[in-house]
Amino acid sequence: MTQCQTASAAASRAWRRLSLRWRGSPPCALCSAPSRPGERLCAGCHADLPWLDQARCARCGDPAAAAIASKDGTGSCDRCRREPPAFERLVTALGYRFPVDAMIRRLKFDGELWLVPVLAGLLLERCSDVPRPQYLVPVPLSDRRLAARGFNQSAELARVLAAHLGIASRPQLLRRARDTPPQSGLPLSGRVANLRGAFVVDYPVQGLHVALVDDVATTGATGAEAAHALLRQGAARVDLWTVAHTLPGRQG
Ligand SMILES: [Zn+2]
Ligand SMILES: [Zn+2]
């Protein structure tokens, strides 16, 4: 069993133990008040989350482009029509702001894997009208980062999403060809250059509709480069699903 699978199995066991301990509603993950039945957040904390307004470009998520996007009914902003990103549709739920940023950091850097079903559940709330892909493909970590963290948070999210949606998660389909320096702190042009050729597709994807899964998108450069790699190998369509997005926007 790999280190990753071990972490994953441990998370499943911990989650089962928690569920058994709280046969009714477990305490809210954010404030310890009773959570909603079957959920891990109370109604107040759920309502107060920085939900992203859905009036935004369906392709890149830019809220500033929402008015333009709705005019011709394509849902795409001017910039996306001129220069479409490689992914067909961005599906995202929350602004990368408190407490979502803190939850994602606790998951990634403190290994709090019990947050995986909480975060996946929040993204699922925005997936009801989304065309179903054949596969969910987590954005891979480099081998070095995977070894250091012990798990890929995107793979954990994809596994839970796939189970809920009854579709397959295929973490082995895409891998990092090389380690890339962290994207944070780089300007957009630097992010794109940093990622060029970073992903390799290891399985046939000809004609497939695939959704990439990531915890958070910033510029979308990582998702776009991963989508490019899949499209170059013949994928018919690639969407990008992320729990959170750093784009500014009204809260809805
Ligand atoms: Zn709460
Ligand atoms: Zn756009």
Image: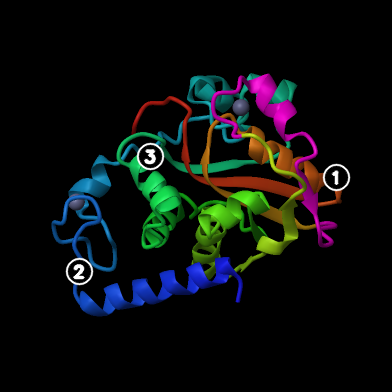
Residue shown at the point (71%, 25%) measured from the top left = 81
The residues tagged by marks 1 and 2 sit, at their Cα atoms, a distance apart of: 47 Å
* Residue, disc 1: 232
Q: Amino acid at mark 3?
A: Asp
Label of residue 25 in the image? 2
- Within the magenta stretch, is there residue 82? no
Q: Does 38 appear above or below 130?
A: below
- Within the magenta stretch, is there residue 201? yes
| Of the image marks 1 and 2, the number of the one nearer the N terminus | 2
The residues tagged by marks 3 and 2 sit, at their Cα atoms, a distance apart of: 24 Å
Label of residue 85 in the image? none
- Residue 105 rendering spot, x and y as whole percentages: 40, 44
Label of residue 101 in the image? 3
Q: Nearer the viewer, residue 34 or 8?
A: 8
Q: Amino acid at mark 2?
A: Ser
Q: Amino acid at mark 1?
A: Arg
Q: Is residue 71 visible?
A: yes
Whether label 1 lies within 8 Å of ligand 2 gets the answer no
Q: Nearer the viewer, mark 3 or mark 2?
A: 3
| Crowdedness near tag 2: few (<14), some (14–19) or many (≥20) residues, C-alpha within 10 Å | some
Callout 3 secondary element: helix
- Residue 188 rendering spot, x and y as whole percentages: 64, 22
